[in-house]
Amino acid sequence: MSFSASDLKAHPEEVPEGPGIYIFRDTSGYLYIGESANLRQRLTKHLDQSDRLSLAHYLQQHGVDAVTVEIHAFDPNSDARSLPMRRAYESELIRSRKPRLNIAP
């Protein structure tokens, strides 16, 4: 699933509450990749006032209008719902996509 960040900010109920991975992008490429046990709660926090200083600074300077968020929500029966699997997937995405605002895991 992919959403504009402004749509997610206005309608957080569109985001599943389960675990998964999220990817922030703008026209220049990947910004930030993260994982969460509750995607809705985590993305709402990021879009309100992120605790990740680099992402918070970027969103404060540039706004959310040009940002998209790709969501990888996991099936309830998937092994990917476990924290170690989510972290491994997140690490691989960070390694392969090299988002500007992540610190390498």
Image (cartoon, helix red, strand yellow):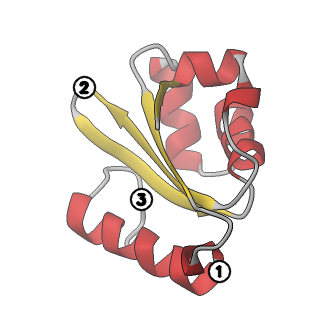
Which amino acid type is marked by label 3?
Answer: Asn
Q: Is residue 24 above or below residue 64?
A: below
Q: Earlier in the sequence, mark 3 or mark 1?
A: 1
Residue 72 in percent (x, y) is at 49, 52
- Left/right placement of residue 30 relative to residue 78 reads left
Residue 10 - label: none
- Left/right placement of residue 81 relative to residue 88 reads right
Q: Quadrant of residue 79?
A: bottom right
- Which mark is nearer the camera, 3 or 1? 1
In percent of the image, x 42 and y 73: which residue is there? 89
Q: Quadrant of residue 20?
A: bottom right
Give the labeled residue for mark 3: 102
Q: Earlier in the sequence, mark 1 or mark 2?
A: 2
In percent of the image, x 34 and y 65: which residue is there? 94
Give the labeled residue for mark 2: 27
Give the labeled residue for mark 1: 82
- Which mark is nearer the camera, 1 or 2? 1
In percent of the image, x 25 and y 25: which residue is there? 27
Which amino acid type is marked by label 1?
Answer: Ser
Residue 84 in percent (x, y) is at 58, 86
- Crowding around mark 1 (Cα neighbors within 10 Å: few <14, some 14 to 19, many 20+) is few
